Image (cartoon, rainbow, N blue to C red):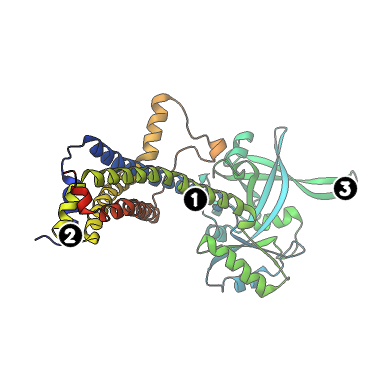
Amino acid sequence: MFKPLSFFIGLRYVRAKRQNGFISFISLASLLGIALGVTVLITVLSVMNGFDQQIRQKIFSLADQVTIIAPRGHLSQWHEIAEQAEKHPFVLASAPYINGEGMISKSGHMLPVMIKGIMPEKQDEVANMKGKFVSGQFGDLKAGEFGIILGSQLAWQFQVGVGDKVTLVSPQVTVSPMGVMPRYKRMVVKGVFQVGSGFGFDSTLGFVHLADARKLFGLTGDAVTGLRLKVDDLYHAIPVSQALKKQWQFAYRVTNWTEDYGQLFSAIRMEKTMMLLVMMLIITIAAFNLVSMLVMMVVDKQSEIAILRTQGATKRMITGIFIIQGLSIGIMGTVLGVLGGVVLSWYAPDIVAWLETVIRTHFVNENIYWIDHLPSALSWSDVGLVAGLTLIMSLLATLYPAYRAGSTQPAQALRYE
């Protein structure tokens, strides 16, 4: 005989054609409800992961992960500081920078700009700008040539490209017989980059060579504004900054990305968590359908349960039959839901893009969501979490009906047969 017997009978109940069509309908509704809930939940979590990933790429292509700044605003011995910082196992690279503000003008048009002086050979080590250049690259900046790489919005507003010239007005002043005058410097456009809207990099930022930045902002010697560090993992920035603070005490100010962007990523994480809880309600409703179906199934099978009990079946065996039946429906719904969720997560961007083309409506506005398309990043850990929670809820949904079936008294069940 097939053993265990409860497993065999439970599977037979799942496959059997029932005379009561309503119970069959509830069974199908439970299975489809679980599958739909799992599909939607996996897809939503994948889209949230995609948003998180896209925003992270936009921010940290240019934003600093860890920065070291001197209390007075200038680091004069940054080589030694960089050497000490790079000894930390999580730090991959470092690069000095000079920050300054100014105004760019051309043909009577003037806009404010944040100037960042960089060492081109080191900037590629700490910044992820691959694929972000419309023209030119960091290596085109040469000391003494006073070249500048502009964000795409700035370049568009001034209608300039590589080789064109703009005027940079520096806040540093020059004393002349005519009085105190701001410094003007002719800059040659060496490149244009485009990170994307949402954080203002394309419309407010310009890169110049570190040596040229010293002259523009009046720094002497080898001084820089600060030192930028790149870490092996984004979330290692916090322990790295804490370790460096402890090492240098109050000699230098050490900051990390969480001080500027931490609230944004906390909000995204909270939205993902809340979305998980809300979407789990769909699966909970399907689990209630599973409870209803099993309770009706127990009532419908009263006589069969009684016969099994009189032939020696234990309460545990009867309970196992209905647990297997309910859990089988939960497993089938979960498997279908996982397959549907994985496929939909992979093709969701293409489906949305096709819908936008068909109905001529743009669902994702770059000015609101910081990206112009629906992103999706499938995480197998999320798939495992959703599948695991669904199976646990399916198992819990079977316990009461199964316990009720196991508590059936043969004499009472057979009284009216």
Q: If you read the primary sequence from the N terminus, does the residue marked by circle 3 or circle 2 appear first?
A: 3
**Residue ID at (20%, 46%):** 301
Q: Secondary structure at mark 3?
A: strand
Which residue lies under the disc numbered 1? Answer: 273
Q: Amino acid at mark 1?
A: Thr
Q: In the orientation shown, which residue stands out farthest toward the left?
A: 1
Q: Quadrant of residue 370?
A: top right
How far apart are the two marked residues, 2 and 1, measured between alpha carbons?
45 Å
**Quick one: label 3, few (<14), some, or many (20+) residues within 10 Å?**
few
**Quick one: label 2, few (<14), some, or many (20+) residues within 10 Å?**
some
Q: Secondary structure at mark 1?
A: helix
Q: If you read the primary sequence from the N terminus, does the residue marked by circle 1 or circle 3 appear first?
A: 3
Q: Position of residue 414 (x, y in %)?
A: 18, 48
How far apart are the two marked residues, 3 and 2, measured between alpha carbons?
106 Å
Nearest-to-viewer mark from 1 and 3: 1
Q: Secondary structure at mark 2?
A: loop
Q: Is residue 75 left or right of residue 176?
A: left
Numbered circle sitting on residue 332: none
In the image, 134 versus 84, the foreground residue is 84
- Which quadrant of the figure contains the N terminus? bottom left
Q: Is residue 44 left or right of residue 344?
A: right
**Quick one: label 1, few (<14), some, or many (20+) residues within 10 Å?**
few
**Residue ID at (70%, 60%):** 225
Q: Position of residue 54 (x, y in %)?
A: 49, 47
- Which quadrant of the figure contains the C terminus? top left
Q: Are marks 1 and 3 in contact (CB under 8 Å)?
A: no
Which residue lies under the disc numbered 3? Answer: 176
Which residue lies under the disc numbered 2? Answer: 313
In the image, 335 versus 232, the foreground residue is 335
Q: Is residue 9 left or right of residue 180?
A: left
